[in-house]
Amino acid sequence: MENKLKKVDLIFCKTCQDDIEVVKKALKRNPDDIINEIIDSGLKGRGGAGFPTGLKWKFAKAQPSDIKYVVCNADEGEPGTFKDREILDQVPTKVLAGMAICAYCIGAKEGFIYLRAEYNFMLNKLNQIVEEFNSKMKEVGLNFEIQIRSGAGAYVCGEESALFESIEGKRGEPRNKPPFPTVVGLFGKPTVINNVETFVYTAMINHLGAQRFKELGTQDSRGSKVFSVSGDTPKAGIYELELGMTVEDFVKEFGDGDTKAVQVGGASGHCVPRKKFENTIIGFEGIPTGGSMMLFNSSRSMYNVLKDYLEFFTEESCGQCTPCRVGCQQLLKGIEAVKRGERPASYLEELKKLAQTMRIAAKCGLGQSVANPFISIVDNFKEEIIY
Amino acid sequence: MSNYMVNLKINNIPVSVPEGTTILEAAKKLNFRIPTLCYHEDLSVAGNCRVCVVEQVGARLLQAACAIPASEGMEILTNSNKVRQARKHIIELLLSEHRADCTECYKNGNCELQDLAHEYGVNQHLFIDLARKRNYTIDRSSPSIIKDDSRCIRCQRCVRTCDELQGVSALAVAYKGEHQKISTFFEHPMFEVVCTNCGQCINRCPTGALIEKTYIDEVWDAINDPNKHVVVQTAPAVRIGLGEVLGYEPGERVTGKMVTALKLLGFDSVLDTDFTADLTIMEEGTELLTRLKKALVDKEKVALPMMTSCSPGWIKFQEHLFPNLLENLSTCKSPQQMFGALAKTYYAQKRGIDPKNIVSVSIMPCTAKKFEANRPEMRSSGYQDVDYVLTTRELGLMIKQAGIDFMKLPDSPYDNIMGESTGAAVIFGATGGVMEAALRTAYEIVTGREVPFRNLNITPVRGFEGIREATVKIEGCLPEWSFLEGVELKVAVAHGLANAKKLMQAVNDGILSYHFIEVMACPGGCLGGGGQPIPTNLEIRKKRAEAIYAEDEGMPLRKSHENPEIHLIYQDFLGKPLSHKSHELLHTHYIPRKRY
Amino acid sequence: MTDIQEILEKVTSKYGKQRSALMPALQAIVKEKNYLSDEDIVAVAKTFDLSTAEVYGTATFYTFLDTVPRGKYVIRVCKTISCHMAGKDEIIEALQKTLKIKVGETTVDKKFSLLTANCMGWCHKGPVMLINDEVYPELTPQKAIEIIQSYQQK
């Protein structure tokens, strides 16, 4: 059988574009044209949620405000994801160029990169690069300055409104939505917040045109995407792949021959068992992902995997909303109780109902998505959870 | 709020509301109550308990009704199966984290979580009991407030109260995830942190996580001790609040019934804090005039504006936050403490009782009064001047414990001595009341005429604006006060410590200048005190204020200096205002405390 | 050790005295002093005109803003799934033995604290640990011990 998996080299290619030239080129264009081209490209946010990037920029541009912000979400915390670190390490100016183009389009003068504390080792280098870039922007006549702010160890700060709170010096607790960031964002001002990778694609689209991007992927999932591959695989690492492949395609390339499940989208994503590899598409028409692909072979206990995830969420929930704060604890204690025989196997059904409530009633994406791994692992590996 | 109207349907009923209206408010308009826990009318919206979730037709996620604005064409279901299941789960989750041994809880019967558990038929623990495994702390260090983390549902109403209404932020949210909790600085005991003991957090706690420290048992013991003579004083705001605990709607005046009930409970003498409120006006009014004379005539350096000192939450606030302004506080003790000092001296003498056998109890709308009574300065009788302070709520509970059918009680008058008062004293219970009472007396002392306001009602200092200002021009002075001729007396009133903070900052920065400032720690003044019945909101506080002013208008005497008992005490015991004896018993000093 | 006021002046001169400078301030203190003491938080609260409870509440939200004393070198071993699968337990065991402390503790000489942390973004190269800001991926117990030894000599 032919392998449908296609590797792409747009993100990490260092010779493809001069990032300052890319910005200069953008400055000669009408912001609306740039935004329309991004809309036309079909680019969706690469952080995982997949909101159409061009629309986000359009909404922010439409806001009548003297002060607007561009924020780069580099709080990559999803277990199994490490591609943003690599992008910032390898091609940082591509990210900055994307931010600058966004600033030009929406009329922002200030930008922030929120870098997770775990990546502080690259802070000095990155600060230098940002400084150089800022002065280059002055030279090319764009009134836009970027600063880096560090996180301090809180997964939930990857949630956009929690990230704003953190930059504002508060606890990283997600806000109520609406209003959305494009209307009321950082410091209460209209804000575009995009993932590191998304900004790179916006710069790339601006440089190579929407067509080049559209050629890749499928109707619902245009373009390519950087994947972080880990777990039971001989080829752990970072790969830029065309969207639209099935899990089957993926496992053929990255599996160790004994893959029993793939967790698509990190701890907050879905677990795909072997029997569903063939029919599951990785992308917005199937299972969307911020890029985390974790493979498990038959030596792994899926109970341990789920327990690990739930421990993670129990700690990393911000704690403000009931479904998430208490729900995570109950799911964790619940599977432990079933394992120990303190609760009957049927209790898993109660817990699944609880997970459904969390999915629709939690305040932010964190609490809402705990149901993804829970239900997919419990449904597909029930015996492993019980016995 | 916007004039632009949006049209939506709630439970298939069309409704039109101004843009910006939340679903919760829109539903209320249609008489649908959506349950809430973290929501409180006095506070900003948090949207974190999620118990108010509703279904928006066509949307994947449920929405928090308290936080989501109505928008055009929305179709909302407040009671679908999806909604009920989610709410039930949320209540069950909260209960699993909550020490739900309700019969042991002080808030049993007045708990929002308990009510919801009942409404949603949550009778058993569906989920694993997390509360029992936790090492929860119960902080009993404060003489006013008990903080019991095992009953906390993390709605953060207390945190928002302490920040938004009081500007203190003694309580904050700490940690995250399963460890998230409501904490003081470094989890230090409440008694050691910057807390004013105002009890506003208690008023807004939906469960029993924040309650007053209760002294009911001690008071029963005193009443039942044949060797003790137990006197009780009742603060102005208790008589218009107590009814709410005992079945009345807010705004009911129950003064006479309350006195009867206190007598039935077995207190030996039922007396009135209002008497010492009148006395406060004599002392404080004279103090103000003396300070003005020193400033205007003697050109002495004297601290102006003078600030009222009746509210112990406010006093502790100043001691912590603005210690540089302590000189500005009137040296007058609060009416409670004046009463306490006199009960074991003047009253004891008049009644021929050994003060060591007197137990002095006060009923207060306030939790800070519990702290105040324990201050080491408050022992000028040679004993602790006030032995036990009970809140309005605690008195309500005692009346219930005694099996008294409160609503059917006849009225009784206060006992004598120290039971006589005027309308000026009653209005101490409302924000602006001390100012109004002081002006009624001071103006008349200076000019020999009544204050130039219709029916003595000085309306500019009344109301619920956070900070209010007024100017009274003094004209036609009596000869001895001629130095005040033509002076425009500038006064300001603030209630709620967040407003006080703003006012103090402005005074400190020299932006605003006044002669006299009244501050009450609690929103609405004592009628909204931390010891008053729960729930509270602006509407309830307005009704209580109406009752206070009605009580004032119904009194035969409405100016403190006309109280015959006041004349008597100066004649027989104190001499004159600010006399040596007054200073000894009725005045105090303040202590700078740490700001952080 | 740098004086707390010095640290705060440096931060406020760069970021101002608004609340948004709070995180940089707390981070700067932790960088210098390894943790936030009672007195440090009081100083921060004064600088930013916030209540101490508020500052404490904010700090404790963030795993890296410690409010208990920590050693000069804070070791954080990733405990999340990939590193778990790759053998973080053996790494922790080796470190506990070498340092003679348990997870959560600090050596008597105040040089090392051993902690675990959630995913650090090196899932393809686990097990991984951070020592202060430095990353050490692809650990083996032997490698981990050698790294600690090199710090012991510092």
Image (tube, coloured by chain):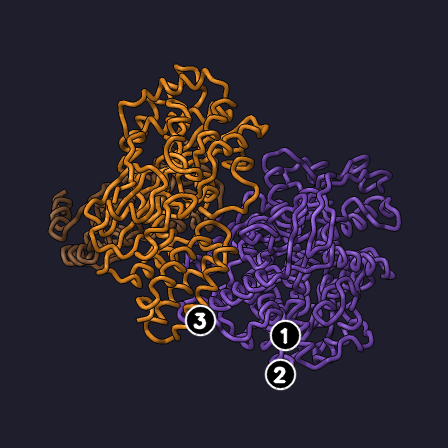
Chain colours: A orange, B purple, C brown
Closer-to-camera residue (A42/B551) = A42
Q: Quadrant of residue B224?
A: bottom right
Identify the residue shown where x is 71% and y is 39%: B2
Give the label on residue B359, or none.
Answer: 1
Secondary structure beneath label 2: loop
Element type where label 3 sits in the image: loop
On screen, residue C112 versus residue A182, left or right, reads left
Of all chains, the one bearing label 1 is: B
- Residue B98 position within the rendered picture, expressed as x and y whole percent measured from the top left: 49, 68
Residue type at mark 2?
Asp
Q: Type of residue at label 1?
A: Val
Residue B437 badge: none
Could you tell me which residue is drawn at 33 percent across and 26 percent down?
Answer: A93
User: Which comes sooner in the sequence, label 2 or label 1?
Assistant: 2
Looking at the picture, which amino acid does disc 3 mark? Asp
In this view, the mark in front (3 or 2)? 3
Looking at this view, name the residue that lies furthest to the bottom: B226
Q: Are marks 2 and 1 in contact (CB under 8 Å)?
A: yes
Whether labels 2 and 1 belong to a single chain: the reply is yes
Q: Is residue A78 left or right of residue B205?
A: left
In this orientation, does residue A39 appear?
Answer: yes
**First-in-chain label (3 vs 1):** 3
How far apart are the two marked residues, 2 and 1, measured between alpha carbons? Answer: 10 Å
Q: Pointers 3 and 1 in contact (CB under 8 A)? A: no
Q: Which mark is residue B129?
A: 3
Which residue lies under the disc numbered 2? Answer: B225
Structural distance between the alpha carbons of marks 3 and 2: 44 Å
Q: In the rendered view, tell whether residue C140 sits above or below residue A59.
A: below
In front: mark 3 or mark 1?
Answer: 3
Asked which secondary structure carries label 1, the reply is: strand
Q: Position of residue C124 (x, y in %)?
A: 23, 45
Write down the chain letter for disc 2.
B
